[in-house]
Image (tube, helix red, strand yellow):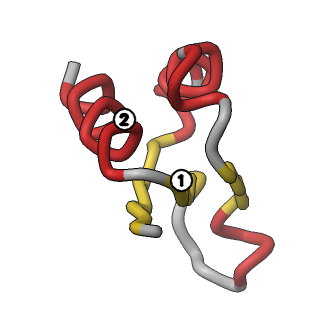
């Protein structure tokens, strides 16, 4: 299994929902954390998607949009 971690600014939280709604990506292991919960002083969230290579590639493509 491969994984990718995205840093998503708070004003772009809708991108997280777009990723999670995708059929291929939604079947993977998805973990989201607010930066403050990790003691990081940023106004962002982190999204980790772990799964097969096809889903990771698709997640990277959607994240670029």
What is the crowding at mark 2: few (fewer than 14 residues within 10 Å), some, or many (at least 20)? many
Residue 33 lies left or right of residue 14; in this view the side is right
Residue name at image x 71 percent, y 56 percent: 31
Residue 56 is situated, as x and y percent measured from the top left of the image, at 35, 46
Q: Looking at this rendering, what residue extends furthest in the right direction?
A: 37
State yes or no: discs 1 and 2 in contact (Cβ < 8 Å). yes
Q: Indicate whether 31 appears above or below 36.
A: above
Measured from the top left, where is residue 23 in percent x and y? 58, 15
Whether residue 50 is visible to the viewer of this picture, yes or no, is: yes
Residue in the picture at 72% in, 70% down: 36
Q: Secondary structure at mark 2?
A: helix
Q: Nearer the viewer, residue 55 or 34?
A: 55
The residue under label 2 is: 59
Compared across the picture, whether 13 is left or right of 57 comes to right
User: In the image, residue 10 lies at what x, y percent?
Assistant: 56, 38
Give whichever of discs 1 and 2 has the lower sequence position.
Answer: 1
Image mark for residue 49: 1
Residue at the bottom extreme of this rendering: 39
Quadrant hosting residue 41: bottom right
Is the C terminus in the top left, top right, bottom left or bottom right quadrant?
A: top left
Could you give the CA–CA distance between mark 1 and mark 2, rounded to whole angstroms? Answer: 8 Å
Question: Above or below — where is 47 with respect to 8?
Answer: below
Q: Quadrant of the rendered structure where residue 38 is?
A: bottom right
Instruction: Give the structural element (helix, strand or loop) at label 1.
Output: strand
């Amino acid at each position: 299994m491969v994984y990718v971690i995205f840093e998503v600014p708070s004003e772009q939280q809708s991108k997280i929902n777009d990723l999670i709604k995708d059929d291929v990506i939604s079947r993977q292991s998805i973990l989201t954390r607010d930066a403050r919960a990790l003691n990081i002083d940023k106004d962002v969230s982190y999204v980790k998607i772990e799964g097969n290579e096809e889903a990771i590639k698709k997640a990277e493509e959607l994240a670029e949009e």
